[in-house]
Amino acid sequence: MYTIGQVSQLFGLPVSTLRYYDKEGLFPNIKRVSGVRQFDEKEIEAIRVIECLKKSGMEIKEIKQFMEWCAQGPQTYALRRELFLKQKASVEAEIERMNRVLDMLSYKCWYYEEAIREGNEARLQSMQPEDMPESIRQAYENAHG
Amino acid sequence: MYTIGQVSQLFGLPVSTLRYYDKEGLFPNIKRVSGVRQFDEKEIEAIRVIECLKKSGMEIKEIKQFMEWCAQGPQTYALRRELFLKQKASVEAEIERMNRVLDMLSYKCWYYEEAIREGNEARLQSMQPEDMPESIRQAYENAHG
DNA sequence: TATTGACCTAAAGTTAAGTTTAGGGTTTAT
DNA sequence: ATAAACCCTAAACTTAACTTTAGGTCAATA
């Protein structure tokens, strides 16, 4: 049983953010004692899930939908599972995308190391993938493919 | 040599976005013929870099800084390289974070499969990591550690 | 010649996810 | 009993990255 200030400490989230989450419906059944919110285990777990779903790129509105399903009991298990499956696929795709971004960044790091060594970009700008070191060529082609 | 409409087609970016990028200083030396923008190879490459840096989480302002460095010539190679190194580290960290999010999502998918099978969450809610299947326990502990 | 289509600018509007402000209540330490 | 330290709400403000709107230029086409 925590106050909003204690939860704020616990998660490193501003009090204003927790109030905002509540206003957006992310704690559908939170208890209050003379107006004061009582965060108990259900809300604490909700915050853990919120943090995870947010990091996965989900919007507050959709997280609210999930929290409503939780409040509705066992008849929504399948919907909740589908939501996590969907989100998992989306994060997997995002990681794939990030790896291609990483390839581009690796290539650019190499590019500027060479540019510094040579004092200009003339050779680099006309360079074909075949003339790059193998690992750089890999990165270059993954990023530009 | 492309018009803004052709570039829009080429990259699948709205014309309004390209104008916005220009207004924000992302094409520092773009040429114009009687007011009309002329996108040539330099700007096309700039857009490729913009897309990459945006996906890596960089803000327009910082991308503008990079474009200004590019316009300043060889004396900024080191600054440009540092920027890409920094961004690479940041994307690597982001991917690490995403993998932990993935662990949480995998755990939740398993959780709801079990909940559907059992019709309720009673057993799951009191389950200790030791009682989970090995791969799920891994995910659970990575996500909650 | 008139209209269509592609270009332009400046400025206002949009959206998400908060944050800040203003005003007020309640419990606790001095 | 008064000030400090919490809690509360409603509403306005913020920020980034666009998007939309309103009004205008110019070239080619029917």
Image: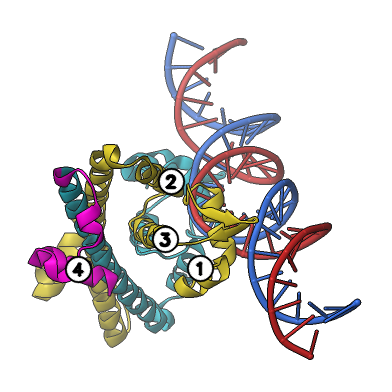
Chain colours: A yellow, B cyan, C red, D blue
Q: Is residue A104 visible?
A: no
Q: Quadrant of residue A124?
A: bottom left
Residue A47 image label: 3
Residue A64 image label: 2
> CB under 8 Å between callouts 1 and 2?
no
Of mark 1 and mark 3, the one earlier in the sequence is 1
Q: Magenta segment, principal secondary structure?
A: helix
Q: How many marks?
A: 4
Please state the chain letter of the residue tagged with numbered disc 2 in the rendered image. A
> CB under 8 Å between callouts 2 and 3?
no
Q: Is residue A122 visible?
A: yes
Neighbours of disc 1 within 10 Å: few (<14), some (14-19), many (20+): some
Look at discs 4 and 2 and give the one toward the viewer.
Answer: 4
Circle 3: residue type = Ile
Neighbours of disc 4 within 10 Å: few (<14), some (14-19), many (20+): few
Q: Position of residue B59 (x, y in %)?
A: 47, 63
Circle 2: residue type = Lys
Separation of marks 1 and 2 at Cα, in angstroms: 21 Å
**Labels 2 and 3 in the same subunit:** yes
Q: Position of residue C19 (x, y in %)?
A: 62, 64
Separation of marks 4 and 3 at Cα, in angstroms: 20 Å
Q: Is residue A108 left or right of residue C21?
A: left
List the residue tagged with mark 4.
B128
Q: In terms of depth relative to the viewer, which is nearer, D13 or B83?
A: D13
Separation of marks 1 and 4 at Cα, in angstroms: 24 Å
Give the residues in magenta.
B117-145
**Labels 1 and 4 in the same subunit:** no
